[in-house]
Amino acid sequence: MKYTVLLGEFVIRYPDLPHQGPEPDGDTVKFMPATPALVQALDRPSGGAPGLNSRGISVRLEAIDALETHFQGTHQDLPAANAAREELLRSLGFTNVRFFPDRPNQVESADSDRMPGYVLSNGIDANGRMIGFVFAGTAPYPDGSQVTLADAEADRSANLVLLSGGLVYPAFYSTMPDDLREHIGTVAQAARAAAGPLSLWGRTSAVPDALAPVTGQADLEALLIWPKLFRRLVSYFGTGASDLGGLDAWLRADPVNRDDAVLLPGTGRAGRLHDVLAVHDGGVQLTVWPWELVIQPDPA
């Protein structure tokens, strides 16, 4: 599977719209492509058009899932979420980045609002974002060229800098090549084993070896859990649910927006998110590790 090389600039602030600019987080950043037509030509596995306009397009970093800094009026552990955001911006060359005190997701100032870089992308997601590996500086390839992403090159991406440091979780989709996914899985496992001082893994719950006690939405902001599961739980408790008793039925009621299609580890058999969740003793946990799951994109 080939990736398209897109040259351009990463953008974190609009000088003419300082209060309406991008909201970078640990796995999403705005990008202005040098050749917008190349974005329009990318695959669209979920059928939606790219959310590209005169100011660029959001890039959702491939293979990782960062803690939510803002999602439906809530967030995950903010020091940890902001640590991932800071590392992403540093990796892309941004310095002295400050956020508005009253708008903590928008950049107030930085040494530069734009930095040159490039993206290796193989498609557009269901939300119109470009999925890709992001790199600072000058690309070793021409704009629009098709390349096979080698393990060593992937390791140099900001994506894997974040993952290897334990600042984000893995999140693998079936659109990523199998051999690359296997390599990145080993990076994630090594990060968990190392569990450095900034690593999420030392406090992670809702995984096979740690139940996450959840009695309501308030608990979610204090827990370190896989962000995809966090988003599902926020939406579930947003319905007025008072406990986890109805989670399984709620997931199954919407196989597109809630009960994500996955390939089950060990068998490759098609399954759903509910197949890899266990609810018991007032808590919830994945029965497999995030790097063992392969998520299917939303259907067109």
Image (cartoon, rainbow, N blue to C red):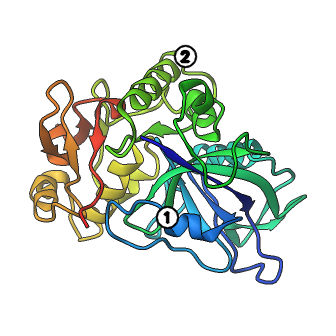
Callout 2, which amino acid?
Answer: Ala
Which quarter of the rendered picture does the N terminus lie within? top left
Secondary structure under tag 1 reads loop
Q: Amino acid under label 1?
A: Arg
Q: Pointer 2: what residue? A: 194
Residue found farthest to the bottom: 16
Q: Give the label on residue 129, or none.
A: 1
Answer left or right for 164 relative to 87.
Answer: left
Residue 127 appears in the picture as rendered: yes
10 Å neighbourhood of mark 2: few (<14), some, or many (≥20)?
Answer: some
Q: CA distance from mark 1 to mark 2?
A: 32 Å
Specify the quadrant that holds the C terminus: bottom left
Number of the front mark, 1 or 2: 1
Residue at (23, 53) in percent of width and height: 260
Task: Check the image and report above or below for 244 versus 140.
Answer: below
Residue 286 x, y percent position in the rendering: 25, 36
- Residue 144 point in image, percent of width and height: 61, 55
Classify residue 177 by image quadrant: top left
The correct choice, above or below, for 298 with respect to 73 in the image is above
Side of 71 where 52 appears, left or right: right
State the image coordinates of residue 152 (x, y, percent, origin top left).
60, 24
